[in-house]
Image (cartoon, rainbow, N blue to C red):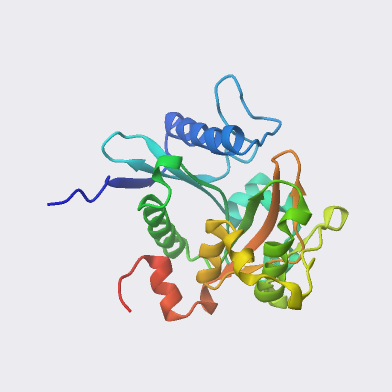
Amino acid sequence: MPDSGPAFTVKIAETADELRAAQALRYDVFVRELGGGGEMVDHDAGLERDRFDPFFDHMIVSDAGSGRVVGVYRLLRDDQARAAGQFYSEDEYDLTVLKSSGRKLLELGRSCLHPDYRGGMAMFHLWSALADYVATHGIEILFGVASFHGTDVEALAQPLSMLHQNHLAPPDLRVRACDDSFQPMDLIASGALDRRRAMVETPALIKAYLRLGGFVGEGAFVDRAFNTTDVCLVLDTARMNERQRRLYSGERGA
């Protein structure tokens, strides 16, 4: 039989070693590869970490053959956010419209894969495990910041404008970048937008959320410490159609 590629296991990190493995992968991707930083980054140990880590669940996907952690997703439910004092993205976005909705929320963040495992099945396994997590905890709305590499907004004008014009969240989901750091996204007139270029320049994770019916909040946040330009993605599970539900849960079928 042909080699079907590596097998994977997915779990929530339970030990200090598993958390360190997640933070080490985050360091490789967000610091070494993308040039990010932060107050609590440990350059000597090669760990990307912050004050929110103790409150999040850390979903890790490992290569079953080697045991190596090759993918990470960081998850924060309402109850965990209350313990932390806020959601992580509240430093960038006003989340009042979501927090006052009375619906169960889950914040997602720090999604990354080892370069050797991008474009393969590792992300599929993370998505499937995330769908199980959402079902287990009765989550209704998923959200979180997703990043474009770099802080040159003019260079990102095409994809930011496309997101604003075509995927802006409806009013009941429309979080907004904080006033003191609000970066407009509607930078190019609709008639001048190169939609193909805009999609090519949009990171794969953002495009995945759009395929699932996700929206973006109003305004971007330029994170100079992390060397990114962030948008806030919002996914309402009640608005997903059946095709999107199958994509999200990993089910097969037309």
Which residue occupies the extreme top position in the image?
44
| Quarter of the image where one finds residue 198 | bottom right
The percent coordinates of residue 84 (x first, y second) are 65, 45
Which residue occupies the extreme left position in the image?
1
Residue lying at 70% horizontally and 66% vertically, measured from the top left: 217
| Quarter of the image where one finds residue 154 | bottom right
Tell me: residue 160, above or below residue 36: below
User: Depth check: 193 or 51 in front?
Assistant: 193
In the image, taking residue 81 as reference, residue 8 lies left or right, namely: left
Residue lying at 68% horizontally and 58% vertically, measured from the top left: 231
- Is residue 92 among what the camera can see? no
User: Depth check: 2 or 220 in front?
Assistant: 2
* Quadrant (top left, top right, bottom left, bottom right) of the C terminus: bottom left
The percent coordinates of residue 175 (x first, y second) are 73, 66
User: Depth check: 190 or 96 in front?
Assistant: 190
The percent coordinates of residue 132 (x first, y second) are 39, 61
Residue lying at 58% horizontally and 43% vertically, measured from the top left: 55
- Is residue 128 among what the camera can see? yes
The percent coordinates of residue 230 (x first, y second) are 69, 53
In the image, taking residue 66 as reference, residue 221 lies left or right, namely: right
Residue lying at 71% horizontally and 70% vertically, measured from the top left: 164
For the image, the number of numbered tags is 0
